[in-house]
Amino acid sequence: MVLLKLFLSYFKIGLFSFGGGLAMLPFIQEELIEKHGWINPAEFVDMLAISQVTPGPIAINAATFLGFKINGVLGSAVATFSVIFPSFIIIVTIAHFLERFKHSKYVKWVFDGIRPVVLGLIGSALYLVGKQSLSDIKGILIAIAMFYLVGIRKINPMICIVGAGIAGVLLY
């Protein structure tokens, strides 16, 4: 029964999330923490951190991580498959019809309407992660430093991740 719940939860996340992994975070939070109680908010932030530093899309990494936590390797396989399966179906369907409708003003309007939603979802994820991660001045200083180094100075994010990890060890 847990595998079916895992499949349905991640299928829904994959089906209704536009804009990539960060835009999925509010849906993931609702399903994993609020609806099923599979993890708590602190574990959610840890899952995001692990998902960000491992190669691959955050949503797939998070699904694999949580699936393993819930039901081992089989849970990982089910969660990972179910989060990518809706995208696969949608992309195949769109590719089939895109040539016919790519110049439609209605298609353009749909995408124009979806873009602000994606920004809002990413903002919601930022708020959620910020609320959990920025609980003291040390965390705030690390976040500001990383924003400056990656966003403004254009330093390689991997170097900054390693630096933030070292800062965490030294400061905490």
Image: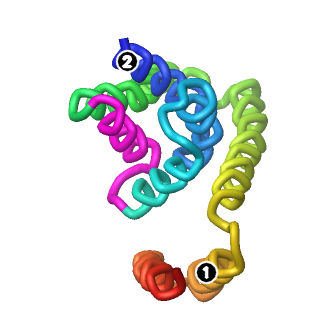
Q: Amino acid at mark 1?
A: Ile
Question: x, y (%) of residue 166?
Answer: 43, 84
Lateral position of residue 98 relative to residue 151, left or right: left
Tell me which corner region of the image, top left, top right, bottom left or bottom right, holds residue 3. Answer: top left
Question: x, y (%) of residue 169?
Answer: 44, 82
> Are the residues flagged by discs 1 and 2 in contact, CB closer than 8 Å?
no
> Residue at point 35% right, 43% down?
65
- Choose between 104 and 116: the one closer to the eye: 116
Q: Which secondary structure, mark 1?
A: helix
Q: Which residues are magenta?
A: 54-71
Please give the label number shown on residue 142: 1
Q: What's the CA distance linking mark 1 and mark 2? A: 38 Å
Question: x, y (%) of residue 20?
Answer: 54, 44
Tell me which corner region of the image, top left, top right, bottom left or bottom right, holds residue 89. Answer: top left
Image quarter of the N terminus = top left
Please give the label number shown on residue 2: 2
10 Å crowding of disc 1: few (<14), some (14-19), many (20+): some
Foreground tag (1 vs 2)? 2
> Residue at point 44% right, 78% down?
165
